Every structure is written in C-alpha cells, then in structure tokens.
Image (cartoon, coloured by chain):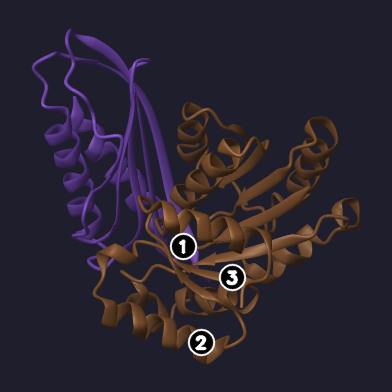
Amino acid sequence: MLEIGAATLVEQLELSATNQLQALFEAALQAADECICTAAPEWLGHCKLMMDTGDQVCYVSRTEANGHNSWRNAPKPLVAATKAEITIYIAVYGIDDRHAQLAAQAAQTMLKQLM
Amino acid sequence: MRAAVLTGFLGTGKTTLLLAVANALADRGEYVAIIENERGSVGIDGRYLQSQGMTVRELRAGCVCCDLALPLQITVQRLSEHYEPDWLLLEASGIAKPELLKASLQHPMISQINWRFIALVDPVRFGKMWHDSYGLGDLLRGQINIADVIVLPKSDLVEPSVLEHVAAEIRSLRPDVPVIPFTADDPAATTLMLRAFSEPLR
C-alpha cells in the first residue's frame, strides 16, 4: 500500500555572519537528495528546510530525485552571528517501512551538513 | 462561510497556492482560517503560513482522511462556530485518500458546509505519477475524480506542449471540470483562482 515515510528534526543552530546561507542550505538539500537516492534513485516526495531567526523565515525544498530547489523567501545575509531554529522535514513516497528509515537518515544527513 | 479543500501530492504547490489565495482574500477584507494537515510530528507549512500572518490550525502526525478524521471534523466545527471566518481553507496531506476525505467532510457534524475540492496536479512530475503502478497513479486519478476544479501549478516550469498534454490526459478522465494553469507570481492567475475557489467555472 502506498505510504509516506516521513522524518522531522528541529535544531537550534548558531550561524555566523560569514555563512553563505543560500549555498549552505542548497548543499544540505543536495546531501539529503543523494542520501535518499542511494536506496530510492527515482524518489518522489518533499524535502524541506526552514530557517527562522526571528528576523527572517526562509524556506527551501526539493520534490524529486535530482530535482530543482524551490525557494520561498531566499535568505538575506546576516549582519551578525545569529541563533536560528532549523526545521527539517523529509517525506518520501513508498510502499514499505524502508522509506521511513530512509527519511530519517536523510534528515540526519541534512543536519550534519548544516552543522 | 465558504470552504475549499486542496488536494495534491507532496511538493505539488498546495501551500503556495493556499497562501496566494489567502493573501488575496485578506486584501479584500475577508477573514480566512486555514487547516493544515501534515504527516510529520512537526509541521513546516503551518508554521510558515503563521509567519506570513495567517490564522492556522495544524493537524499533524496522521492523515485527515482516516486517523485524523474526527479531529478534522471537530476543528472545522470549532473554527466555524468560534471564529466565524468568511473562508475556511483545508490543505490535505499528500497521501489523503480522496473518497475517504470527501466522506469525512460530509459527516453530519459539519454537513452544512459546502466544500469545493481543488485538485493540484503537478505538471513537472506528472509522467512519473500518472503511470506509476505502486499507488501514485491511482491516488492521482482519485484526486482528479472528486475535484470541482483542477489546477496545474508550476506551469511556468514546463513547456506549453507538456502543459497541453497533461491537461488532455486529465480531460480524458474529467471532461466536465475546468483545468487551470497557475503560477504564484502572476496576479491574474491568483484572481482566476479566487473565482475558481468561489464558483463553478465553465
């Protein structure tokens, strides 16, 4: 039966003003995509990454294997080191429990890339 | 109160469409309440919509068509009675079974509400879904079968010939419903969506 394997992580990160946020987030999304592709090379679903600093909320996502990044409110450069709440949500269509484990792995991979 | 439910796969653009329509309604002075359903234990879409100034109730870690059907009915009833919004917009999860969802929204507790079903069909990934034999194809056809309106979001990301092909496939199943392309940054498209949410288009 068709299911969604999903995983969510919420973490507080310290971001320095020198961080290239857009590039950092896109690299994290790419890492998650590659992680999912190892077991599901033609995956469909939704990998999402949201950052909330209090001053700005940015959001980027990808919906298929090797897909394009879709931004809502691309990040503005930081003027000083900032604490940010990062929310990662990975959801992959599949027909067995394997996809939930895969989503969890991809979420961890994305977080590792951000830290 | 008017009410619309958005169905569609994960990543199809339901939240983007919902935000565009909700903003346009708010600009007209109408009060919009939103119900967000996500499978994860922590929602992103609901929090994003709240960050954009929207009134949102989240139903998480399940699906409103089955295990969250009762919480959905209670939420709809409470929102409509306590907040009296002009509009109630429901974003279903990407796995909601259309027939079950429709039945859930026809429960006697909330049967006075007349829902319009807006199905979003992603033209970018249409080929992968339409022909999938593991359930995606059936889910997609189910969404199309119960729809009052079918929207093709991200229409700026595909060639016109692809958009025509997708629309033709949909019309082969549902020749009786309008199929409308949509791009979030086109005000005219949002205006057309407001009509599609409100009244039958022919």
Q: Position of residue A61 (x, y in %)?
A: 30, 46
- For residue B177, above or below residue A106: below
Residues B190 and B2: in front is B190
In screen coordinates, is B1 left or right of A106? right
Q: Quadrant of the C terminus of chain A?
A: top left
Question: Residue A55, percent across and down?
Answer: 34, 16
The chain assigned the colour purple in the figure is: A
Residue B40: image tag: none
Q: Residues within 10 Å of mark 3 (few under 14, many from 20)?
A: many
The residue singled out by tag 2 in the image is: B171
Q: Image quadrant of residue B129?
A: bottom left
At 19% across and 29% down in the image, what residue appears?
A114
- Evaluate if marks 3 and 2 touch, with contact meaning CB atoms under 8 Å apart: no
Which element type, helix, strand or loop, lies under badge 3? Answer: strand
Tell me residue A103's x, y (percent).
35, 49
Vertical arrangement, residue B148 with respect to residue B175, above or below: above
The amino acid at mark 1 is Phe
Q: Upstream in the sequence, badge 3 or badge 2? A: 3
Mark 2 in CB contact with mark 1 (< 8 angstroms): no
Q: Around disc 2, counting alpha carbons within 10 Å, would you say few (fewer than 14), some (14 to 19), or many (20 or more)? A: some
Mark 1 secondary-structure assignment:
loop
Instruction: Choose mark 3 or mark 1, whichever is in front.
Output: 3
Q: Are marks 3 and 1 in contact (CB under 8 Å)?
A: no
* Colour representing chain B: brown
Question: Circle 2 sits in a helix, a strand or a loop, which is it?
Answer: helix
Q: Which mark is residue B9?
A: 1
Under mark 3, the amino acid is Val
Q: Nearer the viewer, residue B147 or B20?
A: B20
Residue found at the very far bottom of the displayed protein: B172
Amino acid residing under circle 2:
Arg
Residue at the spot of label 3: B149
